Image (tube, rainbow, N blue to C red):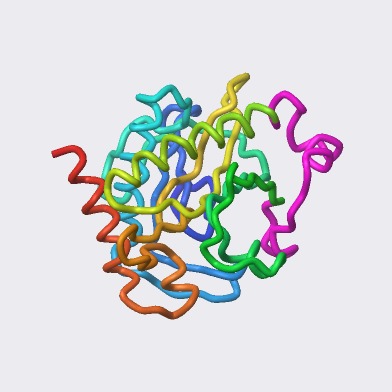
Amino acid sequence: MEDNFLYEGKAKKILTTEDPMVVRMVFKDDATAFDGKKKGKIGDKGQVNARISSRIFRYLQQKGIDNHFIEQSEPGEIIARRLEIIPVEVVVRNLATGSISRRLGLKEGLPFNPPILEFYFKDDQLGDPMINEDHIQVLGWASREEIEKMRESAHRVNGLLLELFRGIGIQLVDFKLEFGRAGEELLLGDEISPDTCRLWDLKTGEKLDKDRFRQDLGNTEAAYQEILRRIEELEE
């Protein structure tokens, strides 16, 4: 284990740097689904997700969304501000699919207007249960002010990403965000990639995200590469 090892999750390793307030995020090719019950690897996923996340975080910064991104140092690494992560996933849903379709018996692809925002407690052993704002505040995970900031930021991010992905022929179906504290600041953290977003081709409806791994659809590597190719074309 590296001397500067800080934390390892399912998709990334977090390493310290000479600056105690800055970390290296090393993206892995490991793939998991269903709260870690299904495991595998997706070729070059680490590099692809790091590159996608870097471009999206830069885009969001340009649009006024504060986040932890500093720079991409290596193909599969991001340099970022060190955050005290709030153990809450913020999920924004534009169309029905996945767990909300199973829970409520909704047809896949049903549009939500306005989008639905949900909170989940980050705990694989408990199956990342859905929670509400009272849980978050009473259990001390975030203040009421922080909850409102997360909610507001998530909706702003949704609007910006809908526009970004629509411009490259992609429907942003849903996505999850994580937030953390850097001192007194609340910042968007983690990653934004086909691991954390559901992305469907606007013309064909083809799934170009981790659902290809979850559902054994095949060609997962090619789907991730396609998202990266389209995003990088925006910078040309």
Residue 164 pos. (x, y %): 34, 40
Q: Does 195 appear above or below 220?
A: above
Out of 233 and 54, give the one closest to the viewer: 233
| Residue 94 horizontal/vertical position (percent) | 53, 50
* Near-viewer residue (49 or 150): 150
Measured as percent of width and height from the top left, residue 87 is found at: 68, 45
- 16 displayed left or right of 151: left
Name the spot of residue 3 as percent of width and height, x first: 46, 47
Q: Is residue 113 magenta?
A: no
Quadrant in the picture for the C terminus: top left
Is 148 left or right of 81, judged from the image as shown? right
Toward the left, the furthest residue is: 236
* Residue 199 figure quarter: bottom left
Residue at 64%, 27% (x, y): give it: 149
Q: In this picture, which residue range is highlighted in magenta?
A: 122-147
126 up-or-down from 176: above or below: below
The quadrant holding residue 134 is: top right
Q: Is residue 128 magenta?
A: yes
Q: Residue at x 26, y 60 (%)?
A: 225
Q: Residue furthest right?
A: 138
Residue at horizontal 55 percent and vertical 49 percent from the top: 176
Instruction: Give the residue drawn at x 51%, y 62%.
Output: 109
